[in-house]
Image (cartoon, rainbow, N blue to C red):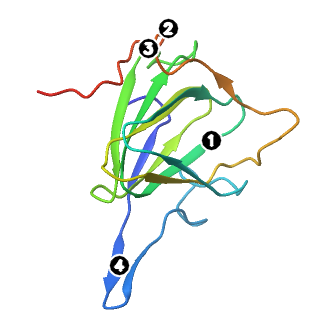
Amino acid sequence: MIEGVIVKRLKVIPDERGRLMELLRSDDGEEFFTHFGQAYMTTGYPGVVKAWHYHKHQTDHFAAVSGMMKVVLYDDREDSPTKGEINEFFMGEHNPILLVIPKGVYHGFKCISEKEGIIINIPDKVYNYKKPDEYRLPAHGSRIPYDWARKDK
């Protein structure tokens, strides 16, 4: 696993009215929660890839709450013992997890379900419209050694 990446299994609490699932709590411990920046939703249509970017100052907290997403991380940090490592996470309705993505780690996702996938992100910083903390590479053909195509085994 890439250094600094953390996965928390999320607990779904169903009853006859529906279900509840806590994503991130302030008492989860410092490895999960440092402070609140903002919360937002991002989506992907079936088969669509949204990648690659990283943040210099922000830690992301992803939870896919509808559909299924393949979230891929690439460690390009010069001082990291896991530099060059790639991690794949299949998350969503069939695998409810919270994924902590540390600053400096490239990430992106692909919707792998037949319906639109929805990710809730709770970063520890607010988005700065005048000076975004986002550093991007193209999803395909960049220097990141990853192929987004489905892998049939």
Give the residue displayed 61% in from the left and 65% down from the top: 26
**How far apart are labels 4 and 2 at the CA level?**
42 Å
Q: Do the numbered discs 1 and 4 sit on residues whose CB atoms are within 8 Å?
A: no
Residue 133 in the image, given as x and y percentages of width and height: 75, 32
* Kind of residue at disc 2: Arg
Q: Residues within 10 Å of mark 1 (few under 14, many from 20)?
A: many
Q: Residues within 10 Å of mark 2 (few under 14, many from 20)?
A: few
* Res 84 label: 3
> Is 52 on the left or on the right of 153, as rendered?
right
Depth-wise, is mark 2 or mark 3 nearer the camera?
Answer: 2
Q: Do the numbered discs 3 and 1 sit on residues whose CB atoms are within 8 Å?
A: no
Mark 1 or mark 2, which has the lower sequence index?
Answer: 1
Q: Is residue 146 above or below residue 27?
A: above
* Kind of residue at disc 1: Thr
**How far apart are labels 2 and 3 at the CA level?**
11 Å
Q: Is residue 131 above or below residue 66?
A: above
Q: Toward which corner of the image does residue 95 lie, by quadrant?
A: bottom left
Q: Which residue is mark 2?
A: 143
Residue 129 in the image, given as x and y percentages of width and height: 83, 40
Give the residue displayed 35% in from the left and 39% down from the top: 89
Q: Residues within 10 Å of mark 3 (few under 14, many from 20)?
A: some
Q: In the picture, which quadrant includes the C terminus?
A: top left
**How far apart are labels 3 and 1 at the CA level?**
19 Å
Residue 63 in the image, given as x and y percentages of width and height: 47, 54
Mark 1 or mark 4, which has the lower sequence index?
Answer: 4
